[in-house]
Amino acid sequence: RATNLVAAGGCTDCPAGHFCPPQSTQPSPCAPGTFTASEEQSICQYCPAGQYQNASGATECKTCDAGHYCAAGASAPLPCPAGTRTNRSLDLMKSVDDCIVCA
């Protein structure tokens, strides 16, 4: 996926956990909150809601911690904000809207 090279030997592989946009000459690690599970990807995917990734260069996302929520693209599990509490009826909280307002 590299261009502007003088020889085919100058091409480098694009490993999982990295992305290689067109015309790039080096792989770039996926940012926290994103991942690539396979090689030769031109973009990183956001972690789905209910998961997070706090490291760069990831090949998968982690399940959100109990008592926290993880929106799509989360780089860390977040606690419910002040005035709300964890929704214990949910196995996985995917957004701040899953938090229950305190009465």
Image: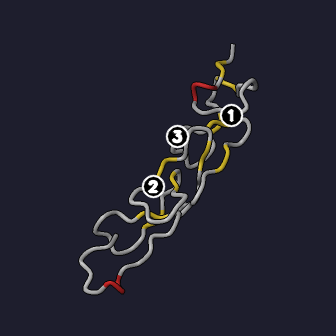
84 w.r.t. 75: above or below: above
81 w.r.t. 34: above or below: above
Classify 10 Å Cα crowding around label 2: few (below 14), some (14-19), many (20 and above).
many
Q: List x then y, in percent, for residue 87.
A: 71, 25
Q: Between disc 1 and disc 3, whose residue precedes?
A: 3
Q: Amino acid at mark 3?
A: Ala
90 w.r.t. 62: above or below: above
Which of discs 3 and 2 lies nearer the camera? The answer is: 2
21 w.r.t. 73: above or below: below
Q: Between disc 1 and disc 2, whose residue precedes?
A: 2
CA distance for labels 1 and 2:
23 Å
Residue 88, picture quadrant: top right
Q: Nearer the viewer, residue 17 or 103?
A: 17
CA distance for labels 3 and 2:
13 Å
Q: Nearer the viewer, residue 37 or 28?
A: 37
Which quarter of the rendering shows the N terminus?
bottom left
Q: Most extreme residue toward the front, as rendered?
A: 8
Q: Which residue is mark 1?
A: 92
Is residue 22 left or right of 49 when viewed as pictured?
A: left
Q: Are marks 1 and 2 in contact (CB under 8 Å)?
A: no
Q: List x then y, in percent, for residue 34.
A: 51, 52
In the drawing, what numbered circle is on residue 72? 3
Kindly state the secondary structure of the residue where label 1 is placed: loop
CA distance for labels 1 and 3:
13 Å
Q: Amino acid at mark 1?
A: Leu
Classify 10 Å Cα crowding around label 1: few (below 14), some (14-19), many (20 and above).
many
Which quarter of the rendering shows the C terminus?
top right
In the drawing, what numbered circle is on residue 44? 2
Q: How is the image coloured?
A: secondary structure
